[in-house]
Image (tube, rainbow, N blue to C red):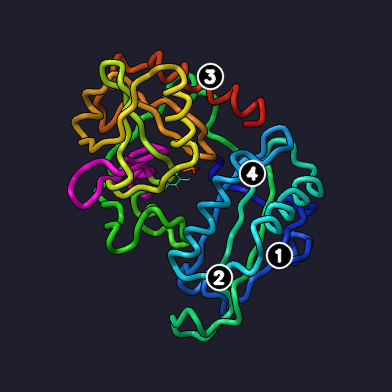
């Protein structure tokens, strides 16, 4: 992903029911999304002018909101329509949608039910993926010292506006000259990366941390599991250690922005022969075809 980005002035943002120019798309300093990270969001891709895995994203958004007792003041149909209009207005064929729901404007205290109600905005823009070289040669990652949030404290299943846990680990990745870091759960098992799910291949079996390891249930993760099963590749959602990753034959990350990107080393241990592996390449190709065909 590009590290710096300046919004294009012609962009139109859907904000609480209306399209406004990006320069006017502002939220209040009293919005609890800003004051406390109190809110939820989705990052969604547009391929060929179509919203990718739309139902799955809507399902996760409303489930995340319900988990934090946030009432989204629009129906799914209304939000899907707003996203579709946003794609057309902004002339986006292949791009990215950021759909955010904040707790809204309230008092300075954290009380979530003393706000005027949720605020919703939709940004539809181009996407900058990792550079092409990463997909050809693979990515080097490190393990972060920062543990992923304990699911009993703040479940990673909730895609909340509070990403500080991930950001702390991302700082460690950047300090190590890497773009991603593996985060372990409080038991020491692999959870996920800072903004992506993690997969490995061992003896032909595709493995990824199970939901109970404390992960965001990635929509790309689910799709990759489905595509692998369709190919007859055995899959396992299980507990994995850092050493399982060091000793894996192949590894890759998945995410809406990253799609499927090979991982060729972790903590300076080469994974497999240090090159993207055959199952990884197959699933990258399957993913691209699926996305091109519009899901
Ligand atoms: N884990 C985290 C922490 C994420 O933020 C994301 C999304 N960027 C993912 C996993 C991947 O999820 P998805 O495939 O739904 O984008």
Task: Tell me the residue that label 1 is attached to.
Answer: 15
In front: label 2 or label 3: 2
Task: Tell me the residue that label 2 is attached to.
Answer: 71
Q: Tell me which numbered mark, 4 or 2, is placed earlier along the sequence.
A: 2
Task: Tell me the residue that label 4 is attached to.
Answer: 96
Residue 173, located in which quarter of the rendered image?
Answer: top left
Mark 4 falls on what kind of element? strand
* Label 4, label 2: how far apart the Cα atoms are: 24 Å
Q: Tell me which numbered mark, 4 or 3, is placed earlier along the sequence.
A: 4
Q: Tell me which numbered mark, 2 or 1, is placed earlier along the sequence.
A: 1
In the figure, is residue 37 to the left or right of 265? right
What residue appears at the point 38 percent right and 19 percent down from the top-left corner? 233
Name the foreground residue: 30 vs 133.
30
Magenta part of the chain: 170-193
Residue 253, located in which quarter of the rendered image?
Answer: top left
Residue labelled 2 has its Cβ within 8 Å of some atom of ligand 1: no
Image x and y of residue 125, in percent: 69, 46
* Label 2, label 1: how far apart the Cα atoms are: 16 Å
Image x and y of residue 56, in percent: 54, 45
In front: label 2 or label 1: 2
Residue labelled 4 has its Cβ within 8 Å of some atom of ligand 1: no
Name the foreground residue: 62 vs 168.
62
Task: Tell me the residue that label 3 is attached to.
Answer: 285
Mark 2 falls on what kind of element? loop
In the figure, is residue 69 to the left or right of 71? left
* Label 1, label 3: how far apart the Cα atoms are: 36 Å
What residue appears at the point 40 percent right and 17 percent down from the top-left corner? 232
Mark 1 falls on what kind of element? strand
Q: Is residue 17 magenta?
A: no
Please say if the residues under marks 2 and 1 sit with CB atoms less than 8 Å apart. Answer: no
Q: How many numbered discs sit on the rendered protein?
A: 4
* Label 2, label 3: how far apart the Cα atoms are: 39 Å
């Amino acid at each position: 992903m590009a590290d710096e980005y300046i919004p294009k002035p012609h962009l139109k943002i859907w904000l609480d029911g209306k399209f406004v120019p990006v320069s006017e798309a502002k939220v209040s300093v009293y919005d609890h999304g800003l004051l406390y990270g109190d809110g939820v969001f989705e990052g969604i891709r547009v391929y060929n002018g179509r919203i990718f895995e739309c139902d799955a994203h809507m399902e996760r958004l409303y489930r995340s909101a319900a988990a934090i007792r946030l009432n989204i003041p629009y129906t799914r149909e209304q939000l899907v329509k707003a996203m579709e209009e946003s794609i057309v207005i902004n002339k986006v064929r292949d791009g990215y949608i950021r759909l955010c729901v904040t707790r809204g404007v309230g008092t300075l205290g954290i009380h979530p039910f003393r706000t005027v109600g949720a605020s919703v905005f939709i940004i539809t823009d181009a996407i900058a993926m990792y550079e092409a070289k990463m997909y050809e040669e693979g990515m080097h990652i490190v393990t972060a010292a920062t543990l992923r949030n304990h699911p009993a404290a703040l479940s990673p299943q909730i895609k909340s506006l509070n990403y500080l846990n991930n950001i702390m680990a991302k700082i460690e990745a950047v300090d190590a000259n890497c773009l991603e870091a593996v985060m372990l759960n409080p038991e020491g098992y692999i959870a996920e990366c800072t903004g992506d799910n993690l997969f490995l291949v061992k003896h032909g079996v595709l493995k990824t941390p199970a939901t109970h390891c404390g992960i965001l249930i990635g929509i790309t993760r689910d799709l990759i599991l489905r595509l692998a099963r369709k190919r007859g590749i055995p899959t396992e959602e299980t507990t994995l250690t850092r050493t399982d990753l060091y000793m894996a034959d192949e590894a890759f990350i998945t995410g809406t922005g990253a799609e499927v990107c090979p991982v060729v080393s972790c903590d300076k241990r080469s994974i497999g022969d240090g090159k993207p592996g055959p199952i990884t390449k197959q699933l990258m190709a399957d993913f691209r075809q699926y996305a091109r065909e519009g899901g």
